[in-house]
Image (tube, rainbow, N blue to C red):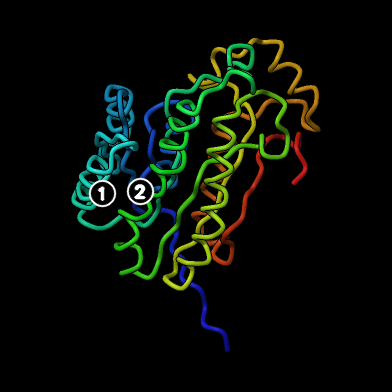
Amino acid sequence: MTEARTAIPLNEHIVVVTGGARGLGASISRAFLREGARVVIGYHRSQDDAQRIVDEYPDRARCAHLDIRDRQSIQEFAASSSELFGAAPTTLVNNALVDFSFNGEARPKAADISAEEFRTQLDGSLHGPLAMIQALRPGMAERGFGRIVNIGTNLFQNPVVPYHDYTAAKAALLSLTRTFSHDLGPEGITVNMVSGGLLRETDASSATPAEVFDAIAEGTPLRSVTTPDELADAVLFFASPWARAVTGQNLIVDGGLVKG
């Protein structure tokens, strides 16, 4: 008989959400908190926003400074996140985004984009998640249980806007998702990705013209643009017992705009 895979209910999770104070990150933090989980919100420049979430859930939310481009900051954050609730985190959501605005008209085209712009996004969307996983893995491995959810993009399949640096970095993160799922699976750790399209609305998408939102909505079977709360629901799924046999997957959550 095959041994049952380890699973714990959402209200027993200790969750780390990078960039968890604003926009999509705040929706993810609140989604886990509504399910009874304990959540450590990693913030860089948004301490007041993080503290507001803590004030809403004073018994189960904590916040700590985190710069995902700095390994020392990540190590300090990982240590403090274990101390805040007296146990190592079970779940990591790599959500933080470094200095990016979703405005296709203002983004550099192929002839102009610089290697430095690629490095900036790789630092935030690949090197940061890599360091976060490495910092939190020991606690997950010791417990024999861990859930890692990386935030991606549907631009892999539908590169309709020139977000070259952002899309390349997220594509690298998808590769890491798949290779790490194989490497970490024997330790009881799953690694998955949730990929949205343009979300209505976050700070990063606030520069997007209204007509772009309307055009996207018209192109989806649901005739709507995905909200941060809707994408957060999919993140919960990968952390839940219902996804205990799912790893190395990329789930697209965009109202059906892009097909697998």
Relative image position of residue 209 (x, y in whole percent): 64, 10
Q: Which mark is residue 78?
A: 1
> Of 166 and 42, which appears nearest the observer?
166
Is residue 124 placed above or below 48 in the rendered structure? below
| Horizontal side of residue 14 vs 227, given as left or right | left
The answer to whether the residue labelled 1 contacts the one labelled 2, judged by CB atoms less than 8 Å apart, is: yes
Which residue, given by chain and number where applicable, does mark 2 sit on?
132
**Observer able to see residue 241:** yes
Residue located 39% across and 33% down the image: 19
Residue located 54% across and 53% down the image: 192
Question: Which element is circle 1 on?
Answer: helix
Q: Which mark is residue 115?
A: none
Relative image position of residue 130 (x, y in whole percent): 40, 49
Q: Quadrant of residue 109?
A: top right
The amino acid marked with disc number 1 is: Ala
Q: Quadrant of residue 22?
A: top left
The amino acid marked with disc number 2 is: Met
